[in-house]
Amino acid sequence: MVTIVTGGITRSLCTPYVILCYSDELSFRLTLSQVLDLLDADDPGPAICNIAVVPKTEKDAIESDCDSDASDMDFTGDSAHLPSRILNSTAELFRSDHFEEVEPACEDQPNFTIRTRSLTKKLESASSSLLLSSDATTATIPVTKAESISAHLIKRNNKSRHFRKSKKTAKSHLPDYIVYEPTAAQCLKATNANPLDVFLAMYPPSLRELPIEMSNLYSAQNKDKPLNLSMEELLVFDGVLLSSGYCTVPRRHLLWSLDDDVHNNSISNAMRRNKFDEIMASIHVVDNTKCNDDPFFKVRPIFQELNSSYKILPISKWLSVDESMIPYYGRHGYKQFIKGKPIRYGYKVWSLASSGGYLYHMEPYAGVHTLLQKTGLGQGPSVVLGLAEKAGVPGGCNFMHDNLFTTLSLIDEMTKRGYGCIGTLGQNQLFDVPFKPINEFQKLPWVSTEFLSEGEKLLVRWRDNSVVTVASNVENVYSEAPVKRWNKEGKAYDYLQQPQIIRSYKQQMGGVDLHDLQVSRYHSTIRSKKWWWPIYAWTLHSAVVNSWLFHRVVMNGDYDLLGFQRVVAQSLLKKFGIAPKGHGRPSSMLAAVTDIPRCFMNHNICKYKCARPMHIECFKKFHNLNHKP
């Protein structure tokens, strides 16, 4: 039986399940119609009294406490009477005992019970199952990948954990890291690809065809003159952007200047200045008439295509998760400010990269609109698990991340999924952990250590220049390794003992920061007023950095980043550029003379065999009679 309610008001006091409908369309939730079909097909029996459906708030509707079936108090609602806009909305199933009961506001209807959603008592359910009975039994419902339900994982408190002062942990049984061959990288290597071929593989044709179509469409919609952008012109346009990263001028028009101090021959011979300005004014990657709720919908295809093309290189065993910042100082609702960062203002991008700086996956941060699955473990763990799932990271890989992402519950979940994990822990994650108080630990001698074990996890605290706490499921036994430290007093290096878990973290962490550093080295200086232009330019240089790393690792190239970017930019300009039209052949006719001298016979003069300015007839007479050679 289904009881249809509005605004959270239901007529039944015995409602063990509540279905919430959402206004935003999320791909990982089922629709209300699918949830009702699953409940009807499962036939849970008499244990379920009623099901309350809380529809999404209608924009122009009038809130009412009446059923969708206008009938007496004993009539049961029928799901077939629901409108399609509610049946097609995304929904989620909750137990009603996780909703707080509030006294009704209307005294004329004493049997009504108003139930408000309680965030602290939200039902934790697995992504592949829904609780369908009031007892501890569960019923598994098959769900396709496109219809996967958001997983709400259980977050354990530190009080419920059993910490031991032991150097050994329980074996985590992580799978071995395996790369299946042949890979796409090996296939590309067999073609003896040059730097331009590697870049065009990393910046795929699908990503180049989309701006051509959308830019021509935008020009037709908003400009009086069609753009008629071609593939060759777009590649030359990108080549100009790459060239401006290492050949900087105060104004972009100076690149086409004929002055010797600023003239750029390769750019001016590949594309005309006016054509470049036309492309800059009309460049787009989406149709503006089909906007949606995604704050980054204008650049979403760029992220999707690059995330797909970056998988051409097999995912490394050691991975780094961190945030990237795309500099932007204009106005935008999702512009971020991070104090103490090299780039304080801009767009934040969650990134997954190898320890060498090769970027595998990136997702722009957009608050609740971020396209990463919510897990119930907090924002940081949700980012790590979401990136691992979207990038398709195989089992046996090890993740490095800082205290923004690391929690003990995250390490537990990573162990279940077959991933290694090493991360620093902040003080807010160390409540009820039997370490010494931080004030007492700071008074201990330099390079003092403290360790704990809990299940498959090893927790190590070490005092270097500051106190750092690291947790991991990779190291099963606590060990130490020598490390060099400069001694100011002795003016020589001292060899000290450092925990191996911290040594591994310092060696493998920082891949995202390294990628950001390489992108910023020779970044394009051509600017635009469009809010998404910094993202377009940043992703273009990100593809160049990934192409350079691919060329070094797979093709055994010896270019540095500057040399590689120069080769790619000049290849684009020379191969796809169009030389300017010449001025044509000079005319064979002599220029007209405005001031013509005359001879004494009032004849127009001309030159004939000598420099005497005379008329031809007069010249003959003069030459034969008076001219002396």
Image (spheres, rainbow, N blue to C red):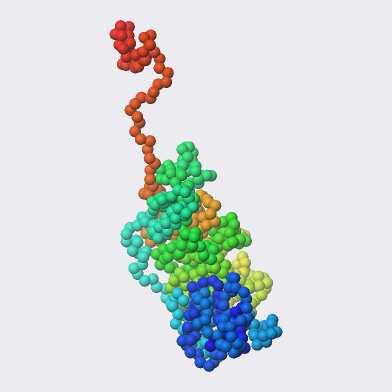
Image quadrant of residue 185?
A: bottom left
Residue drawn at x 36%, y 65% as measured from the top left? 184
The one of 406 and 617 positioned closer to us in this rendering:
617
- Is residue 384 positioned above or below 225 on the image? below
Numbered label tally: 0
**Residue 412 shows up from this direction:** no
In the image, taking residue 232 as reference, residue 163 lies left or right, namely right
Q: Is residue 56 visible?
A: yes
* Residue 289 at x, y percent in the picture: 49, 60
Name the one closer to the observer, 592 or 407. Answer: 592
| Residue at 61 percent of width and 88 percent of height | 73
Percent coordinates x, y for residue 217 in the rendering:
44, 55
Point out the residue furthest to the bottom here. Answer: 46
- Residue 468, x across and y down, in percent: 60, 70
- Image location of residue 165, percent across then percent down: 58, 81
What residue is at 64 percent from the left and 70 percent from the top? Answer: 445
Residue at (57, 88) in percent of width and height: 75
Does residue 202 sit above or below 136 in this rendering? above
Q: Quadrant of the C terminus?
A: top left
